[in-house]
Image (spheres, rainbow, N blue to C red):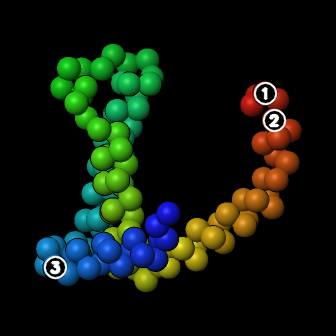
């Protein structure tokens, strides 16, 4: 399992070696929106009710999800966010706040 701090370092090293520099935060936000849209397109057509176009059948959901993660890691790096710390804190919050919420949701049974 890869720790998020290690993933952030891998992305930072890649940017320094291959990417020249980070795109600015607004450009990366637009890029993230585009990548999430590509994930949404695959999900809507492959698992939803929309028919899948021939040109979409070769799209790899894992690759598109990895694109989302890459851009999120870029944004975290350039804004000084420690994603491992933020993720760990979020899981603690969710575990306390939602401990019984989903268990008691009749829609999930």
Q: Position of residue 37 (x, y in %)?
A: 34, 42
Q: Which mark is residue 105?
A: 2
Q: Mark 3 points at which residue?
A: 17
* Picture mark count: 3
Q: Is mark 1 on a helix, strand or loop?
A: loop
Q: Is residue 11 left or right of residue 69?
A: left
Nearest to the eye among marks 1 and 2: give it: 1
Q: Distance between the residues labelled 1 and 2?
A: 7 Å
Q: Are marks 2 and 3 in contact (CB under 8 Å)?
A: no
N-terminal label among 3 and 1: 3
Give me the residue at 29% from left, 65% from top: 28
Q: Can you say whether 54 is above or below 79 in the image?
A: above
Q: Residues within 10 Å of mark 1 (few under 14, many from 20)?
A: few
Q: Residue 109 carries which label?
A: 1
> Helix or strand or loop: what does disc 3 sit on?
helix
Residue density around tag 3, few if under 14, some if 14–19, many if 20 or more, within 10 Å: few
Front-most of residues 50 and 7 = 7
| Left or right of residue 66: residue 105 | right
The reply to whether the C-beta atoms of the residues labelled 3 and 1 are less than 8 Å apart is: no
Quarter of image, res 14: bottom left
């Amino acid at each position: 399992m890869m720790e998020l701090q290690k993933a952030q370092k891998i992305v930072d090293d890649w940017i320094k070696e291959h990417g020249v520099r980070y795109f600015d935060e607004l450009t990366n936000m637009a890029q993230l929106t585009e990548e999430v849209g590509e994930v949404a397109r695959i999900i809507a057509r492959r698992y939803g009710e929309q028919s899948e176009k021939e040109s979409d059948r070769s799209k790899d959901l894992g690759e598109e999800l990895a694109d989302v993660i890459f851009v999120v890691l870029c944004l975290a790096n350039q804004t000084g966010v420690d994603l491992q710390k933020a993720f760990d804190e979020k899981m603690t919050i969710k575990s306390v706040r939602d401990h019984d919420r989903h268990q008691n949701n009749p829609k999930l049974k």
